[in-house]
Image: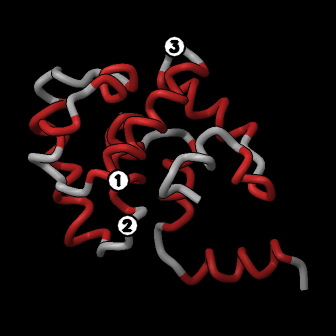
Amino acid sequence: MKLKDVVDSYMRKVSGIEMHCDRCLKTERWGSSVVLMVVDAAFTSIGLNYFTAVVPKVEEFNNKFVSSGRIKNLNDLAAADTDELKGIWRNERSWRAAKDIASHLSSVKDNDKDALRVWAENADLKNRGKDPIGEINGIK
């Protein structure tokens, strides 16, 4: 049996998963905010429950920083004050990871979506430890 057959069999069993995957590939998660996608990934990396811990805190971050216009893009996230961010989420390692990811992606392209897409297209999963984002502490 081919890998595609296995994946397709699971895809048929999970309602809405194809639509969710398509939204991710089109960078449409979190209202198309790459900043929120990066924060989501950094919070998720410590293993807490996604729906009861991560999602509410990403929404709180969105309300306080993104919706208010204080953090508009990856450059702003990279430059944000960690002590202030810790008012939302106390885990400093998560913020270091988010800020380091934002810093790297913002150096790839000026447009956040383009930067994420270019990085994703060129990321080598086999050698992810050698990738600039894969080298970030807490990402491996």
Q: Earlier in the sequence, mark 2 or mark 1?
A: 2
As drawn, the label of residue 84 is: none
Position of 41 with respect to 3 (left or right) is left
The CA distance from mark 2 to mark 1 is 9 Å
Q: Residue at x 27, y 51 (%)?
A: 92
**Residue carrying label 3:** 110
Q: Quadrant for the C terminus, please.
A: bottom right
Residue at the right extreme of this rendering? 1
**Residue carrying label 2:** 46
Q: Between label 1 and label 3, give the one nearer the viewer.
A: 1
Query: Is the residue marked by circle 2 packed among few (<14), some (14-19), or many (20+) residues within 10 Å?
Result: some
Q: Secondary structure at mark 2?
A: loop
- The amino acid at mark 3 is Asp
- The amino acid at mark 1 is Arg
Q: Residue at x 15, y 30 (%)?
A: 67
**Residue carrying label 1:** 93
Q: Residue at x 59, y 42 (%)?
A: 133
Q: Secondary structure at mark 1?
A: helix
Q: Between label 2 and label 1, give the one nearer the viewer.
A: 1
- The amino acid at mark 2 is Ile
Q: Position of residue 3 (x, y in %)?
A: 83, 76
The CA distance from mark 1 to mark 3 is 26 Å
Query: Is the residue marked by circle 1 packed among few (<14), some (14-19), or many (20+) residues within 10 Å?
Result: some
